[in-house]
């Protein structure tokens, strides 16, 4: 029984010292053509999202957890977002207005709205091998323009969504 208080203090310390995802991105170095090359620490819990414009960001998750509150989002306007091997819990994990993305081998759980939302389907965007479970609305949503090509969406395991697993809204 003496170990329970020790575990409680350890867990509390872990949550109080949690780094935000935005802090991890902003302090990461430029590398391999990316403005920010982020290697998250295995077992580390990161919080929140971030807003970025015209940046190239690579996130290597190493099975780190990104815990988001209801309105937290990793938002990209232009540029490129490449993410792999990251666990996202809660929030509205990824929203991309314009730009491209490679979202591969991630887990998304208990999102408050759309899990992955793309305002325009951008050429070169790849969404594959992800696990998406228990979303507030759609698993993957693409609002496209007629002249834009569809992103490559394949081998995703999506279940327990409030609405559809996949949604494509091209207006009209």
Image (cartoon, grey):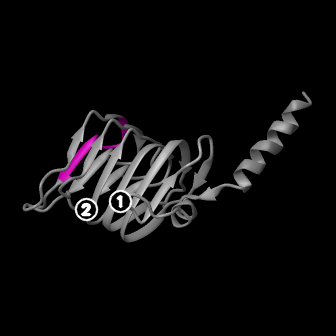
10 Å crowding of disc 1: few (<14), some (14-19), many (20+): some
Label 2 close to label 1 by CB (< 8 Å): yes
Residue 77 found in image quarter:
bottom left
**Regarding mark 1 in the picture, which secondary structure is present there?**
strand
Residue at the right extreme of this rendering? 2
Callout 2: few (<14), some (14-19), or many (20+) C-alpha neighbours within 10 Å? some
Chain-order first, disc 2 or disc 1: 1
Quick one: which residue is furthest to the front in this view? 32
Question: From the viewer's perspective, is 142 left or right of 71?
Answer: left
Residue 14 placement, left or right of 21: right
Distance in Å between CA atoms under marks 2 and 1: 8 Å
Mark 2 lies on residue: 119
Q: With respect to residue 155, does 83 lie above or below?
A: below
> x, y (%) of residue 52?
41, 69
At a point 8% along the width and 60% down the height, the residue shown is 146
Q: Is residue 35 magenta?
A: no
Q: Is residue 169 above or below residue 54?
A: above
The label number, if any, that marks residue 20 in the structure image:
none
Regarding mark 2 in the picture, which secondary structure is present there?
A: loop
Outermost residue, top side: 1
Residue at (56, 65) in percent of width and height: 27
Residue located at (31% from left, 66% from top): 79
Q: Is residue 167 visible?
A: yes
Residue depicted at 13% across the width and 58% down the height: 170
Relative image position of residue 105 (x, y in whole percent): 39, 38
In the rendered image, the vertical position of residue 158 relative to residue 145, given as above or below: above
Task: Where is residue 81? Give x, y as percent.
Answer: 36, 57
The magenta-colored residue range is: 159-168
The quarter of the picture where the N terminus appears is top right
Report the front residue among 67 and 127: 127
Q: Which residue is mark 1?
A: 95
């Amino acid at each position: 029984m003496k170990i329970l208080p020790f575990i409680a203090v350890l867990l509390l310390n872990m949550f109080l010292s949690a780094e935000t995802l935005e802090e991890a991105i902003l302090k990461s170095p430029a590398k391999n053509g990316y403005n920010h090359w982020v290697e998250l620490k295995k077992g580390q819990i990161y919080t929140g999202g971030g807003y970025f414009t015209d940046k190239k960001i690579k996130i290597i998750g190493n099975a780190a957890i990104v815990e988001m509150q209801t309105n937290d989002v990793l938002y990209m306007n232009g540029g490129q977002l490449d993410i792999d091997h990251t666990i996202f819990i809660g929030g509205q994990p990824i929203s991309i207005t314009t730009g491209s993305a490679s979202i591969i081998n991630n887990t998304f759980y208990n999102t408050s709205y759309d899990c992955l939302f793309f305002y325009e389907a951008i050429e070169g965007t790849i969404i594959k091998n992800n696990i998406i479970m228990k979303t507030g609305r759609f698993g993957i949503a693409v609002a496209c323009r007629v002249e834009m090509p569809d992103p490559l969406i394949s081998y995703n395991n999506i279940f327990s969504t409030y609405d559809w697993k996949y949604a494509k809204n091209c207006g009209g």
